[in-house]
Image (cartoon, rainbow, N blue to C red):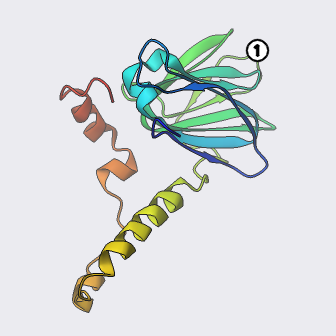
Amino acid sequence: MVDQALIALKESTEFAIVAYQYEQDVSSDESTIELIQGGFRTITGRIDQQNRKAYTAQISDFATIGIRGTDFEVVITDNGVFTGVYDGGTTVSNGSGSLDLGIRANYDFAQVATPNSPPTGLLQQPPGLGIAPFAATIDAEEEDSTDDENQNSEPENSDDADSNTNEPTDDQTGDDDAQADADTSGNAGC
């Protein structure tokens, strides 16, 4: 999206961009999305960074999700809505209650069983979450960029290639301690 937000949709998803405007104007920029069926994962962009109230995600008739500098995922199943936060935080709300997820919250995952039931915190990632192809998309873009740069350079030593691992960093694992430290370092917009 123009504000650098990313959205990955699961197959068989019905999704709508209800309102979207980004002109780097805090008073008028907005992003309102709606999940009708299926699932998505998103990393919010600049609209969230400049005005968190300008970003909302409506999840069918089940709930609305507000965000706080976030990488989150949502899926609608036969057992209700499941949502999870991988970075930042969300607030899942409906007429029966609200629940904070992610940074400084007790849970990273939640279920809303019916549109009339309150959000319930979950200690483990529920089935159906974590399968949106976000990392593959980001890795492919980085690989394309690296390939372009390497075309004009000499080949690397093969011993160096063996030392390259795919172990996730703290940023990729959603390490809450690392994020909490970052939150207290004055990065209020994240």
Q: Position of residue 83 (x, y in %)?
A: 60, 35
Quarter of the figure with residue 50? top left
Q: Residue at x 65, y 35 (%)?
A: 82
Q: Position of residue 77 (x, y in %)?
A: 77, 39
Q: Residue at x 55, y 37 (%)?
A: 84
Which one is in front, 71 or 28? 28
Q: Position of residue 62 (x, y in %)?
A: 73, 22
Q: Position of residue 12 (x, y in %)?
A: 79, 49
Q: Secondary structure at mark 1?
A: loop
Which one is in front, 149 or 88? 149
- In the rendered image, which quarter contains the C terminus? top left
Vertical placement of residue 148 versus 1, above or below? below
Q: Residue at x 18, y 29 (%)?
A: 185
Q: Is residue 40 left or right of residue 25?
A: right
Write down the residue under mark 1. Answer: 116
Quarter of the figure with residue 92? top right
Amino acid type, residue under disc 1 in the picture: Asn
